[in-house]
Image (spheres, rainbow, N blue to C red):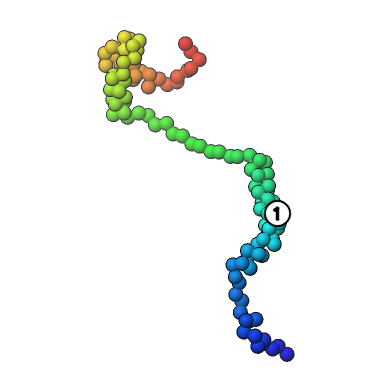
Amino acid sequence: MNTVSQNPEANTRNISLSDLIRLFWKSKKIILAVTLLCTCLSIGYLVLVQPTYQATTRVLPPQASDLAEYVESVNTIDTGHFRERHSTSTGLRACLRDFLHQPQIRLDQK
């Protein structure tokens, strides 16, 4: 036969903060062991797995307005030797137009 306790305090489930702190303090070794285990597993995963990176790029041809702004900004910069070779804005524009419309730029050529 199942009887209900006559003591009202025995039927309540109140947990005080001090009881929780005592419980955690008694279980501190288990909590520390689980934390260290998870940390070690995480570090091992990070070391063993090769990172994969992916990037894509699109190079769009310049618009006429972009080129005009660039030419104006280059005209305002005094570059000495470059300015002597291309002293007029039309010469500079022709140089930039030829440079931007080259089919292939080779860096190994002098």
Q: Is residue 101 left or right of residue 57?
A: left
Location of residue 25 by image quarter: bottom right
Location of residue 58 by image quarter: top left
**Image quadrant in which the N terminus is located:** bottom right
Can residue 74 be seen? yes
Question: Disc 1 on helix, strand or loop?
Answer: helix
Position of residue 43 relative to residue 5, above or below, is above
Q: For the residue carrying disc 1, how many other residues have a C-alpha within 10 Å: few (<14), some (14-19), or many (20+)?
A: few
Nearer to us in this view, 9 or 60: 9
The residue under label 1 is 33
Nearer to us in this view, 92 or 5: 5
Nearer to us in this view, 49 or 64: 49
Where residue 57 appears, as percent x and y from the top left, is: 46, 34
Position of residue 12 relative to residue 104, above or below, is below
Nearer to us in this view, 3 or 108: 3
Location of residue 66 by image quarter: top left
Image point 63% across, 39% down: which residue?
50
Where residue 96 appears, as percent x and y from the top left, is: 34, 19
Where residue 67 appears, as percent x and y from the top left, is: 31, 25
Where residue 26 appears, as percent x and y from the top left, is: 69, 62
Image point 45% across, 20% down: which residue?
104
Image point 47% across, 17% down: which residue?
106
Looking at the image, which residue sits at the far bottom? 1
What amino acid does circle 1 point to? Ala
Q: Is residue 17 left or right of residue 28?
A: left
Q: Is residue 76 left or right of residue 49?
A: left
